[in-house]
Amino acid sequence: MSEDTRSDVYAELAAVGPYGVHPGHALITMVEPDPGHEYAYNRWYEDDHYYAGAMAMPWMYAGRRWVATRELQLLRYPAKSAVAEPVTAGCYLSTYWVTEGRYDDHMKWTVGINKRLNRDGRVYQDRTHVFTAFQDHEATVYRDGAAGPRDFHALDHPYKGLVLEVIDAEGPRQRGELLEWLRARHLPRALAPRGEVTAPAAMVTLFRPTPLPGDRMTYVKQVEGVDARLTLLWFLQEDPRDCWEAWFTGRDEAVAESGLGRVELVAPFVPTVPGTDTYVDALR
């Protein structure tokens, strides 16, 4: 006799609740495999966890993995980071979109499936979660206005790079002011052309982290600075190494000059090549 999977409930669930395409929420997770476990970790994540622990879940509708080789890790700043210690920690980044209004539904599933995966020995233990948080979408700023891919396309469009930026406001009350400054003033300027040179980033998505559930897996630490932090994802049409000096150095100074916050991490990545171990031998 086949296992009862309660299939009749699926039709009921599909008939209720939000089902738009807007990325109302995200899972952003930066992980460091233990030394000597780089290949095994990469294969586990790509061959099993990316699907069983993420994409197969309800309402998580887009995902992409990114990697920072040692060359890219050494571009990161500031040297003393509240996010990564040392600042080079976290060579793999995974980003996922969750349908707006489905955060609670998704969280119930993800806690349940990860408990099951852990019980069944399908969780790779030799790794460290450097920066893992579910986040609520706050805004997206586009370089080209209405032309080009939207934020719901971002994890499927073949972008050549991504920059993760984490900014902490002075406190919870200041985060709204920081967000508005970024959205309305700073990021539009940062995405504007310089003479005849087009900005390498096509869009920047802004998120604010949310506390992880109390029944999360114990190997994932609770989110720090949840009331004052903003997370920015810059989607690049160029390799970050080709535009780093001109476009991404000094971002900490620009934010500090605003008096609204401080940059805790600026970290470049390139997309992984699914199904391969490309870049694994360049992590150390």
Image (spheres, rainbow, N blue to C red):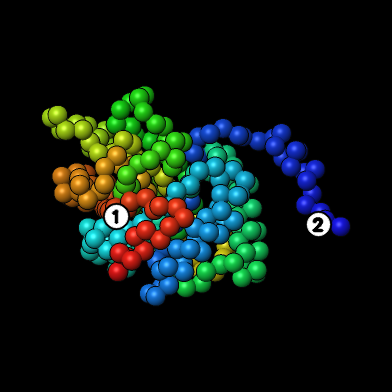
Residue wearing tag 2: 3
Residue 269, given in percent of the width and then of the height, sits at 32, 53
State which tag comes first along the sequence, 1 or 2. Answer: 2
Quadrant of residue 31 within the rendered picture: bottom left
Q: Amino acid at mark 1?
A: Ala
The reply to whether residue 5 is in sight is yes
Q: Could you say which is closer to the camera, residue 215 or residue 219? A: 219
Q: Is residue 119 above or below residue 139?
A: below
**Residue drawn 36% across and 28% down?**
148
Residue wearing tag 1: 267
Q: CA distance from mark 1 to mark 2?
A: 46 Å
The reply to whether residue 180 is in sight is no
Q: Secondary structure at mark 2?
A: loop
Q: Could you say which is closer to the camera, residue 239 or residue 7? A: 239
Q: Amino acid at mark 2?
A: Glu
Label of residue 63 in the image:
none
Residue 6, given in percent of the width and then of the height, sits at 79, 49
Residue furthest top in the image: 146
